[in-house]
Amino acid sequence: MKKKTIFISIFFLILMSNFVFGQGDISKENLEKIKKSYSKNDPYIKAVTNAVCKNSIKKLSKNHFSVGKYDHNFKYKVNVKGITNQESSGRCWMFTSMNTLRPKVIEKYNLSEFEFSTNYLYFYDQLEKSNLFLQGIIDNKDKDLDDKMVNWLLKSPIGDGGVWNLFTNLVKKYGIVPKSAMPETYTSENTSGMQKIIKKKLRESALTLRRMKSAKKEDLEMKKLEILGDIYKILAINLGEPPTEFSWNYKDKTGKISELKNYTPESFFKEVVNFNENDYVLLMDDPSREYYKLYEIEYDRNVYEGQNWIYINLPVKEIKEFAKKSIIDNEAMYFSCDVGKQLDSKEGLLSLDNYDYESLFGVKFEMDKKDRIITFQSGSSHGMALVGVDTDKNGKITKWLLENSWGSNSGHNGYLTMTDEWFDQYMFRVVLLKKFINEKTLKILKQKAIKLPPWDPMFSFDK
């Protein structure tokens, strides 16, 4: 008995010793080593601690030596007019898509200003995303709740973010209308409240559909339509019901008023806008994946029968040359990036030199673009229209111009100037007309797309 008791005691002491002093924990000795990195007797440490404790990090890290380094003048600029405002919503992708087409309408009818109705397409975006979610639940109803796809669906049943192909999916199916035909509402400009209500209903409905395991296909479809009826009602109460017919006329720059004409959303799209989505190519710079390959992102769409995000992965240097050609030819582009990184919103400048966190804290930050992607530190977060490029006397690109959708009081009169170096590090997506792309790149579209899962670190919607 004594030997057994001694053995248990020794085992317990060893176990406790590993618990208190084992590898992986912060022991007292390790804590003392860690604390040596901060010396409160160091005059610099004293000064910076006092400053940071009473001021914002961003304000204190503002790099004085980069102030005034860049102006907002551009040698080449698309003929754009007016700044839109998405307000408190994640509809940047929709505004951006429309802002690439808006200059064409303004030029076509010699207008001083023009806006499409974002509210109109937002209504159908939310309805279609609800259907996509519910059908996804039906298609995966025999899988366990902890299955990765089911889990992903339930975590993100709906959102107001998106990308270019979501816009083209909508206009192909529902057409488009001017802002006057379906103006903004409080909810369309402040989407979070309605989003919470719809998510709650969709998650509840997902459980209802999953519990209908033995139901016939037609019974599941009937139940889904019943649920979508509730979603439609929520949307209509918040956004208004989309018009099926409307009247529109315009006043041109000379003051001449056009004849009042009747349209459907489809006929307005065909007569006033009329672009072919097949004329465009979607490019990305994702150094975490092989270049010169075609990729498709599963569930990166809003319409169930619509097109996923399919893109060519190209080095940023090549993308920039194509984009430059587009701007010189007066064609705006859909562009998305990690806008929050090194953004001086007051100056309207995106530059790697804006904020010097390393000098403020005496700590190095050394990840490159690939490292930031695979660790979720960086990814596409916001869409804007790429409308300008500037070059030096030797033709080398120095900076770019972005038309934002945060209102004219944001940035530099509603625009953001982006340095070429910032473009390299934080640009992710751009949509160009195929006529600006070389044959070598266009041949990549003939490849069979490599399909990627929707939960990949690279693929969040632009907001």
Image (tube, helix red, strand yellow):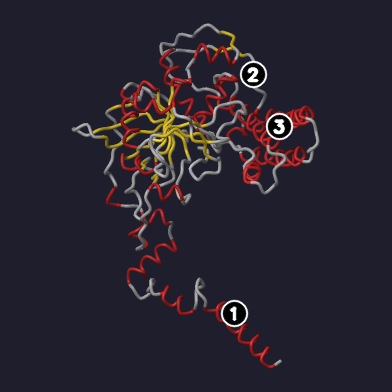
Q: Residue at x 66, y 33 (%)?
A: 130
Amino acid type of the residue that numbered disc 3 sits on in the rendered structure: Ile
Earlier sequence position, callout 2 versus callout 3: 3
Count of numbered circles in the view: 3
Question: Percent position (x, y) of residue 393?
Answer: 19, 32
Query: Could you tell me how far apart the alpha carbons at marks 3 and 1 are, in whole angstroms?
Result: 57 Å
Q: Which image quadrant for residue 360?
A: bottom left
Residue 425 to residue 18: above or below: above
Residue 154 x, y percent position in the rendering: 66, 43
Q: Residue at x 32, y 71 (%)?
A: 43
Residue beneath label 1, please? Answer: 15
Q: Quadrant of residue 158?
A: top right
Tell me, yes or no, whether the two marked residues, 3 and 1, touch with CB atoms within 8 Å.
no
In this view of the protein, which residue sits in the foreground, 39 or 458? 458
Dividing the image into 4 quarters, which one contains the N terminus?
Answer: bottom right
- Per the image, the residue denoted by label 2 is 243
- Relative to the observer, which residue lies in front, 424 or 327? 424
Q: Which residue is mark 3?
A: 231
Marked residue nearer the N-terminal end (3 or 1): 1
